[in-house]
Amino acid sequence: MGKIVGGFLVPHDPMMFLAPEAPPEEVRGRMWAAFEQCAHRLAKLEATAVVIVGGDHYFNFGTDCLPQYLIGTGDVDGPLDVMPGLKRQFIPDSQDLAAFVARHGHENGFDWSVARAFTVDHAVAIPDRLIVDPVRARGQAIGTIPVYVASGVDPYISMSRCAALGGAIRAAVEAAGEHERVALIGSGGLSHWIGLPQMGQVNEAFDREILAYACSGDLDAMTRLSDEYILQHGGNGGMEIRHWAVAMGAMPGAHGYLIDYAPVPEWVTGLGFVQLMQ
Amino acid sequence: MSRNVLERLLHRLCVDRREKQRFKEDLEGLLERHRLTEEEKAMLRALDVGAMQRHGVNPMLTIGFWFENAPDPTPRAYMKALAAPAARGPEEDR
């Protein structure tokens, strides 16, 4: 059987690329170093595949089709939203495992939408570029499997369904071939207000509440947060903690190690980095 | 529901190069191709992102629309437009 070998909860802040020098030097240095730390830690896990969980920013999917949850089972590239220092490129994939996860879900009550050729946006491209690519550069072959959940456009997927979806990913991995060693990356958060008048505000208290759930492994408490609470205290971008819930759901009983956190209003969000360990 | 049509057009104005070109060169022609209310057409003519949000449009679309189509596509200009007071209707003008 395959194995979940670890997980990470990280931001995917495009402002790091669009305004790299906006925050104080000490803060921005720490944030880039935190991504490097994640890459270093991922390398030690000797993963064969990484499932990166993100959410659409009303960019990949339009009004014609808004999936609750989707998995990329074919070729992957990105980002769709190119930016300085983040050009579009092919992303090594893991098509056999991704298709297996989808099929396993379909047979067990999880009706995945699939993308057979998928240009991901920055939600997946940033952690892939900053965490997975450096490990590939060291010679490890890791395929990326993108997963998108409806966190940015209503109707939102529920927090509890996200946790269950993580469980479905774990069940599929454990039913896959024993050579599969899979890490998860929950990509997003913490508090931020995308496109709203409050954009630029950061709610450190909300961020630390979520980090506490992640570090103590209290997924039940996190899934009990109502959408109204998250939107009020974490903003519409705070809904991205759903991506963290998927990763945490795939690692029941795991605790988190806080790699770093900083509220960075210049980059319009609180940036938290956690490694999940069982 | 008309908001949905407005969101569809705004999404296209984020990702479709031809639609962005039409917005720039033939705005009235573009508006005629979509079943929008006069109020919604006015929002698009004025790039009134605040009114769009009050109308229920997802903020991710208003900011994407702004960055892709506004004459000054900067965050500062977007925030200024968002903070502009709501336009008063004819009844309130009296």
Image (cartoon, coloured by chain):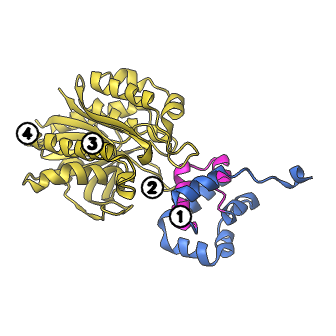
Q: Which residue is mark 1?
A: B73
The label on residue A30 is: 3
Q: Are marks 1 and 4 in contact (CB under 8 Å)?
A: no
Of labels 3 and 1, the one closer to you: 3
Task: Name the residue located 72 percent from the left edge and 50 percent from the top edge.
Answer: B85
Which secondary structure, mark 2?
loop
Task: Name the residue located 56 percent from the left edge and 61 percent from the top edge.
Answer: B66
Report whether mark 4 lies on the same chain as mark 2.
yes
Of labels 2 and 3, the one closer to you: 3
Q: Which residue is mark 2?
A: A61
Chain of the residue on which disc 2 is drawn:
A
Dot 3 amino acid type = Arg
Asked if residue B76 lies in the magenta stretch, the reply is no
Is A147 located above or below residue A165 in the figure? below
Report whether mark 3 lies on the same chain as mark 1.
no
Spatial CA span between label 4 and label 2:
34 Å
Which secondary structure, mark 3?
helix
Work out whether mark 2 precedes mark 3 in sequence or the reverse, and give the earlier one.
3
Q: Report the side of A270 relative to A143 (left or right).
A: right
